[in-house]
Image: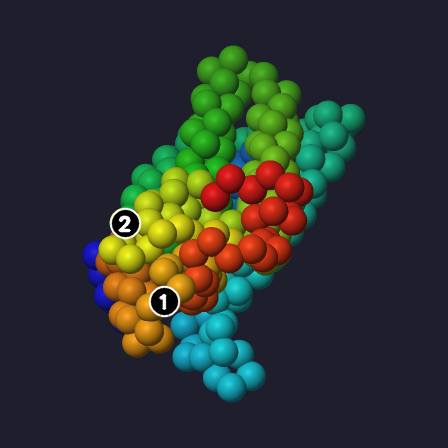
């Protein structure tokens, strides 16, 4: 598992590579769109233009999110990654709606395509470059748990699908002279872009509103706490993700006759178990005497919290 410093270096490298690839694809597709007159290629160009902006935003967000905590921001700046993902979702939706409008207008007033072979070559190169970038980004996102890199990678997953569809579209135009297929493909691509934007925006908003970590992560954390010698119970476990760093809060139930020093030792062991499972995790533990009667968060949230 990479260290925190290695994680940050990986994220910055991935963001820089994404910006470079996005600029290259924009230049390539600009030539393809204007040379062929294909709306499908133009839709891919617009998506790439949004990717340039989004990748720059991702790079800025990662730079900002890796700043150390300050007196005013004691949790750090991890939320910048979720904000970045939300802005990217807006760019994707905007580009999708723009192409959708252009597709409708071209159905009303059809336009002929030229040099479809050049368009196929352009999109083939774009497809190969994009697949290489996705492979790299997914590896970085998996190692660093970065929401921003994962969101940026989602852009390029869409690009792979759209590039493939555009190649098929251009082949159909070239072989069967059906120009409408180019417009139809562009409309489908734009609709999928809007759908992707919805998913990205929803995830980013849930992170910004402190959604709990996945149930399997919470279960592993709970099991680790319960397996610490001296812990008789756990309640009010809370968790959240701040830019790839997991935060856990929990109440540990222990023998009420323990000394403060003994209780502190048990809590330290519990924290170490969580940190071993999730490197760089932040753990806050409250000590409770076992059997005490009190109002618990688990009992007040909808009356049905299980973990």
- Residue 135 in percent (x, y) is at 30, 44
Residue 216 horizontal/vertical position (percent): 39, 40
21 sits left or right of 77 in the view: left
For this orientation, the residue located farthest to the top is 176
**Which class describes the residues within 10 Å of circle 2: few (<14), some (14-19), or many (20+)?**
few
Looking at the figure, which quarter contains the N terminus? Answer: bottom left
Of the image marks 2 and 1, the number of the one nearer the N terminus: 2
Q: Residue at x 47, y 74 (%)?
A: 76
- Rounded to the nearest angstrom, the CA distance separating label 2 from label 1 is 20 Å
Is 48 on the left or on the right of 142, as rendered?
Answer: right
Where in the figure is residue 159, as x and y percent of width and height? 46, 39
- The part of the image, by quadrant, that contains residue 257 is bottom left
Is 182 rendered above or below residue 128? above
Inspect this view and state whether residue 197 appears. no
**Image-quadrant location for residue 190:** top right
Q: Is residue 158 left or right of residue 38?
A: left
In this picture, is 129 found above or below 229? above
Using a 10 Å C-alpha cutoff, classify the residue at mark 1 as few (fewer than 14 neighbours), some (14 to 19) or many (20 or more).
few
Q: Which residue is mark 1?
A: 257
Tell me which corner region of the image, top left, top right, bottom left or bottom right, holds residue 208.
Answer: bottom right
- Determine the secondary structure under disc 1: loop
86 or 111: nearer the viewer: 86
Dot 2 corresponds to which residue?
Answer: 227
């Amino acid at each position: 598992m990479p260290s925190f410093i290695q994680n940050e270096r990986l994220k910055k490298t991935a963001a820089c590579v994404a910006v470079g690839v996005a600029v290259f694809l924009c230049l390539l597709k600009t030539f393809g769109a204007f040379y062929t007159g294909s709306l499908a290629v133009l839709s891919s160009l617009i998506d790439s233009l949004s990717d340039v902006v989004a990748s720059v935003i991702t790079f800025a967000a990662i730079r900002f999110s890796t700043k150390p905590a300050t007196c005013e921001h004691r949790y750090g700046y991890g939320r910048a990654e979720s904000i970045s993902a939300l802005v990217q979702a807006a760019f994707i939706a905007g580009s999708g709606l723009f192409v959708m409008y252009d597709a409708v207008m071209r159905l009303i007033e059809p336009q002929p395509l030229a040099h479809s072979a050049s368009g196929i070559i352009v999109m083939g190169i774009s497809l190969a470059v994009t697949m290489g970038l996705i492979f790299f980004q997914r590896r970085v996102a998996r190692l660093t748990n970065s929401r921003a890199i994962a969101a940026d990678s989602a852009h390029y997953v869409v690009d792979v699908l759209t590039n493939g569809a555009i190649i098929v579209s251009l082949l159909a135009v070239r072989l069967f002279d059906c120009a409408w297929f180019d417009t139809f493909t562009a409309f489908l691509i734009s609709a999928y872009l809007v759908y992707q934007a919805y998913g990205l925006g929803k995830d980013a908003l849930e992170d910004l509103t402190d959604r709990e970590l996945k149930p399997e992560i919470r279960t592993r954390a709970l099991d680790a706490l319960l397996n610490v010698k001296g812990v008789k119970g756990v309640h009010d476990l809370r968790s959240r993700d701040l830019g790839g760093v997991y935060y856990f809060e929990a109440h540990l139930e222990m023998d009420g006759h323990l000394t403060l020093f003994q209780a502190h030792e048990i809590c330290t062991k519990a924290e170490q178990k969580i940190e071993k499972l999730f490197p760089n995790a932040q753990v806050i533990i409250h000590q409770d005497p076992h059997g005490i009667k009190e109002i618990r968060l688990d009992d007040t949230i909808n009356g049905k919290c299980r973990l």
